[in-house]
Amino acid sequence: YPAQEELNRLQREHKSLMQHNYKLQEIEQRAGNLIPYVFTLLVPFRWAIGVVMLSMSLLVSVSLLLTLADRSLHSDCGWSCGYTLKERRIFNPVDEIFLQLSHVFPMDFLVLGVFVLYIFASSIFGIVCLGIRIFCFSMYALRQRKSMPQALLVLCNVMAYILLALCMALLTIAPDYTAFGSQVASSSGGGAAGRCSVERQATGRNCQVSVIYTFFARIAVSMPAFSVAYFCANWAFILVFGCVFTHCLLNQQRQPYLDDVPECEEEELGLLSGFT
């Protein structure tokens, strides 16, 4: 029946237009808020902001890669202690930046806060875009003012795990700064003065180890399997980051202004049509 098929097509188009109309109404309502206005002011500087964020991501990834390579090549105990390193031998850019800024208080704390906030915000942004998933199966979608309570509860737990993983990641991204800060080993006992390290701290130098490094070092010594798993997970992160970065670099796709609108129920469409 051609007439029935035409009627069904028109009904589907009407449903799609209603969904996009509802999406436009949400955008108009958000346009009166302060945050979209601030984002509008930052539009002329989006290229500069993007370059800064890309530089931070590459800097963190390169530092993580160099630390993993240093542990793989120069660890004395290898698998038995989770590839712990007594003294850094390969140049680490993030570690050197923090060590140099530590001489100008409080620049190192400000830059560290920016790095931590950037990594945390990037993680939250990725979770919001992908939703709550188990492997590749989507469980909950995160939408503004429409998220389910279960999704928000799971998101809070994920945020707590992100903060824990971030504390561990700092020991890999900037190992010397996280463990000893700007401390300098004394030259007592005939040894030359220099930056504190695990090897110099073990020889009786005047070096105080941070609490976070002591906590995770004890875990690495008592449970080497956990440290090895974390070491392999870092290599997996570097591999995934490299593949995704290459894919995004070669396949640039412009994101549409209107995202895919989820399907609405007929009852909800009927309520929406009453306001149009």
Image (cartoon, rainbow, N blue to C red):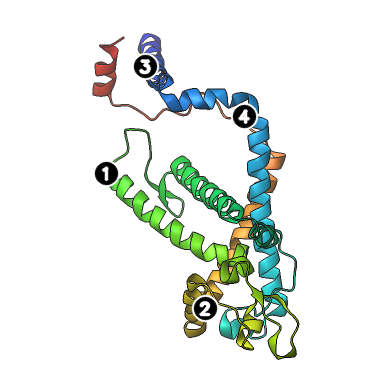
The mark that comes first in sequence, 3 or 2, is 3
The CA distance from mark 3 to mark 2 is 58 Å
Q: Which mark is residue 18?
A: 3
Residue pictured at 67% horizontal, 67% vertical: 67
The x, y position of residue 58, in whole percent, is: 68, 51
Nearest to N terminus: mark 2 or mark 4: 2
Which amino acid, mark 4? Arg
Q: Is residue 18 left or right of residue 213?
A: left
SS under mark 2: helix
Q: Verify CB contact (< 8 Å) between mark 4 and mark 3.
A: no
Q: Which residue is mark 4?
A: 254
Asked whether the residues under the numbered discs 3 and 1 touch, taking CB atoms below 8 Å apart as contact, a structural biologist would say: no
The 10 Å Cα crowd at callout 2, few under 14, some 14 to 19, many 20 or more, is some
Tell me, yes or no, whether the two marked residues, 3 and 2, touch with CB atoms within 8 Å: no
Task: Tell me if residue 94 comes above or below residue 255 in the rendering.
Answer: below
Gap in angstroms between the C-alphas marked 4 and 3: 24 Å
- Label 4, residues with CA under 10 Å away: few <14, some 14-19, many ≥20: few
**Location of residue 61 by image quarter:** bottom right
- Element marked by disc 3: helix
x and y, in percent, of residue 108 in the image: 60, 55
